[in-house]
């Protein structure tokens, strides 16, 4: 996730790091080269009597803008839902830890619950990103729970199951009242809901054909555009053509990037930072020092 300090509006116009320009620069360069070629070849077009008008491009441009708007809104809805889910996970883990500490009043039990909650968040992050969670699970979970989780093909779900079983034992032993157990179980269900909703987003991409049609249309539009502008704009064609192409290409790129919010692209969610925040909260609530440092943006303003 790109996190930049506040800038004056004029300076922000020239921002390179954290923008999409580095990713679409080659495509804009191609458009610039085509624009220059259109200007140089204009006398040849005139001798052949070939003239493209901007009228059809105006109609197509409006249609592309509408579809890009739909695509961007759809992608951002997925991104926003994912961010809300991880924000709710932070709240829910705090609530469970507070409930256990308030009722059981046992430091060892409170620490074990915190370990389960931290392991759940890190395991979910690795699951969504398709990376190996073993190192973080080994760092956080004690035996005998560690072996059972590592041997499970669904590690995140197994961690939640073990936490529920452990709390169920406390309830059956009379250490949790019916009302308290119902409240804690509600929070466990909320964690299961968060996991399932994140899996739904990760496993259900935007239909490929929809994105492919839009991408082909945008690229074809930007390729032919200079030859339609050159008759009227002449030497201003490269400037105007690149500016219009930048608008369409950047919107298409951002929509494509944020439609998978759990990845590691610059505009994806900072899951490492969120998991670290959950871990810091759990350790601090159990009075464990020293605490890990909050993850901060790197020199490119990227928060992982």
Image: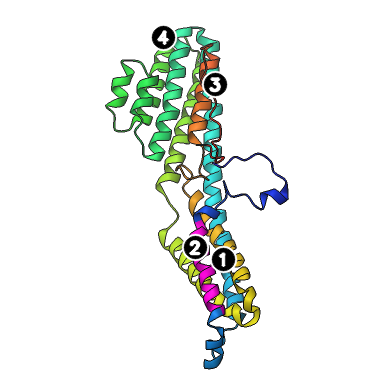
Q: Give how far apart the Cα atoms at labels 1 and 4 are.
A: 67 Å
Q: Earlier in the sequence, mark 2 or mark 1?
A: 2
Of all residues shown, which one is farthest toward the left?
A: 151
Q: Give how far apart the Cα atoms at labels 4 and 3 are.
A: 28 Å
Q: Earlier in the sequence, mark 1 or mark 4?
A: 4
195 lies left or right of 1: left
Residue 285 image position (x, y, % from top left): 55, 15
- Tell me whether the residue at label 1 lies in contact with that at label 3, contact meaning CB atoms closer than 8 angstroms: no
262 lies left or right of 57: left
Q: Which residue is mark 3?
A: 281
- Which mark, by number, is residue 245? 1
The image shows residue 172, relative to residue 228, as above or below, that is above
Q: Residue at x 45, y 29 (%)?
A: 121
Quarter where residue 84 is shown = top right
- The magenta span reads 24-39
Q: Residue at x 57, y 54 (%)?
A: 73
- Tell me whether the residue at label 2 lies in contact with that at label 4, contact meaning CB atoms closer than 8 angstroms: no
Q: Earlier in the sequence, mark 4 or mark 3?
A: 4
- Which mark, by number, is residue 27? 2
Q: Which residue is mark 4?
A: 173
């Amino acid at each position: 996730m790109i996190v930049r300090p506040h800038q004056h509006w004029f300076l922000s116009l020239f921002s390179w790091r954290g923008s999409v320009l580095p990713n679409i620069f080659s495509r804009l360069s191609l458009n610039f080269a085509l624009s220059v070629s259109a200007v140089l070849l204009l006398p040849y077009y005139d001798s052949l009597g070939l003239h493209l008008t901007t009228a059809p491009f105006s109609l197509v441009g409006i249609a592309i803008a509408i579809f890009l708007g739909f695509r961007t809104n759809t992608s951002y809805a997925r991104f926003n839902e994912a961010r809300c889910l991880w924000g709710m996970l932070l709240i829910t883990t705090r609530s469970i830890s507070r409930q256990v500490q308030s009722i059981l009043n046992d430091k060892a039990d409170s620490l074990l619950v915190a370990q389960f909650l931290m392991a759940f968040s890190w395991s979910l992050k690795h699951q969504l990103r398709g990376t190996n969670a073993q190192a973080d699970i080994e760092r956080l979970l004690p035996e005998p729970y560690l072996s059972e989780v590592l041997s499970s093909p669904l590690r995140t779900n197994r961690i939640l199951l073990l936490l529920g079983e452990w709390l169920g034992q406390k309830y059956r032993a009379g250490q949790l009242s019916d009302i308290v157990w119902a409240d804690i179980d509600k929070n466990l269900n909320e964690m299961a809901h968060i996991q399932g909703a994140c899996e739904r987003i990760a496993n259900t991409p935007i239909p490929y054909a929809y994105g492919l049609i839009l991408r082909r249309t945008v690229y074809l539009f930007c390729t032919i555009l200079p030859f339609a502008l050159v008759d009227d704009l002449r030497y201003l064609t490269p400037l105007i053509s690149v500016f219009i192409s930048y608008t369409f290409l950047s919107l298409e790129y951002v929509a494509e990037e944020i439609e998978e919010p759990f990845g590691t692209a610059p505009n994806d969610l900072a899951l490492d930072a969120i998991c670290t925040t959950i871990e810091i909260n759990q350790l601090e609530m159990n009075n464990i020092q020293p605490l890990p440092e909050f993850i901060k943006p790197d020199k490119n303003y990227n928060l992982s």
